[in-house]
Amino acid sequence: MITTGESKREYDAAATVDDKLHCVREAQPKWAATPVSERVSALRAALEYFETNREAIAADITASMRKPLAQSRNELNGFFTRAEFLLNAAESTLAPESLPEAIGLLRRIEHVPLGVVFIISAWNYPLMISLNGVLAALLAGNTVLLKHASLTANIGAHFENAFGNIDAHPGLLRHAFADHLKAGELIQQRKVDHVVFTGSVEGGRTISSHCGGAMLDCHLELGGKDAAYVASDADPVAAAESVVDGCMYNAGQSCCGIERVYVHADVYDAFLEHAKKLIAAYQLGDPTHTDTTMGPLADPGAADTMEDQVDQALAAGAEIACGGQRTIIDGATFFSPTLVLNPTADMAIMREENFGPIMPVMKVHDDAEALAHINDCDFGLTAALFTSSVERAERLAAQIEAGTVYMNRCDYLDPALPWTGYKLSGRGSGLSRYAFYGLTKRKAIHFKP
């Protein structure tokens, strides 16, 4: 039997959440007054907790949301890569900016902490997604109240273990296992100073509404329906390897996973031939087994949406080359890696997020047709272009409505680049130096000595 990772823990009582909030509120002024260089040193030391407990944390990720253990270990690798970038960038980014001399004036721009940042994190990459907000917020001089998803609450506890008990600065972070009602109250009553939310569009609308009424800013990382275009001059084998992995990794449960593919007619057959072989090779099973390459769905009910999209596509004339249905193994719900052929642009499978291992492929005849399809979407997180021409990639990237445009790769976050959602995919930028700007406010120093 494959165990379910869903937390059976009861939500914290409202008074307990308030106590945790009071703790981080009390710790914030001293932390804000600490020089950035000292914050960097303290947080670098605190991150050693994750290195010391690397295997235990990877096992907790797999137990919680049931991705293959190798992928959980890889999430830790990405975690440390992102952490190192933020640690190295903090001092220069957060340093006061002196303006050119003006006669008789001293002018300076300072980056000031917001206060207590309320971070509501997601389950699909429970370590890396949380780190994006947590480490940048702490480096910027804020303290953090972290609410992790119910499915992965044990990962939230690891963040408190690492950052909540620093000797000289206790209480920088507390993990609150709060319900939606209490979370909404914290925002609506301005008990926090900023909100970072990663989750669904519906959840983002709710958070945005709460923040709007309270006159608080929020950072939103929401959904995606990310596109890939394989141009006529692309290597179809290399493109298939990248795109299939971008669709299927983490059982498709990735905000920036590829969910729709446009392939030029000149390379369509070669692309599909290789893609079919790759998709057929996935091994479904117990995520703790070394030969498993795709684990169960974290939410078994998500298979309903996936099957509905597939059934609607079939009824409207699409074809299923492989997969297309849920599979039960040892009591756990999987969705078979799925290749959909001949979809049309109006089908839900090409327009609505499904968060599953489904790869619909549409044949196109030129760049203009592909570009029109890519932009004909309510989401705009990433888009991937496969071509041998940098000039072609630059020309298309300039017209694509997405926060990240890749050439010859997909489904990857570079910590030096801002992670930005266009349209319904979000608001604000995470990672890079822009993460710090979103977690601070500007103070103008305008002195006439």
Image (cartoon, rainbow, N blue to C red):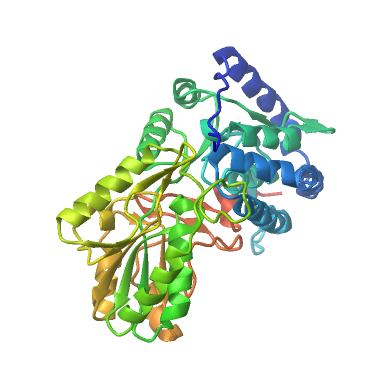
Relative image position of residue 162 (x, y in whole percent): 75, 37
| Residue 212, image quadrant | top left
In the rendered view, would you say 304 is above or below 264? above
Residue 105 at least partly seen:
no
Residue 106 x, y percent position in the rendering: 68, 54
Q: Which of 42 and 176 is in front in this view?
A: 176
Side of 275 relative to 411 (left or right): left
Q: Position of residue 297 (x, y in %)?
A: 45, 43
Say which of 388 and 185 sits in front: 388
Q: Which residue is drawn at 21% across and 55% down?
A: 313
Q: In this view, does 8 lie to the left or right of 254?
A: right
Is 72 or 50 nearer to us in this picture? 72
Which x, y percent locates residue 359? 35, 61
Residue 321 lies left or right of residue 88; in this view the side is left
Up-down relation of residue 96 to residue 24 (above or below)? below
Task: Determine which quarter of the picture holds residue 191.
Answer: top right
Q: Could you tell me which quadrant the N terminus lies in?
A: top right
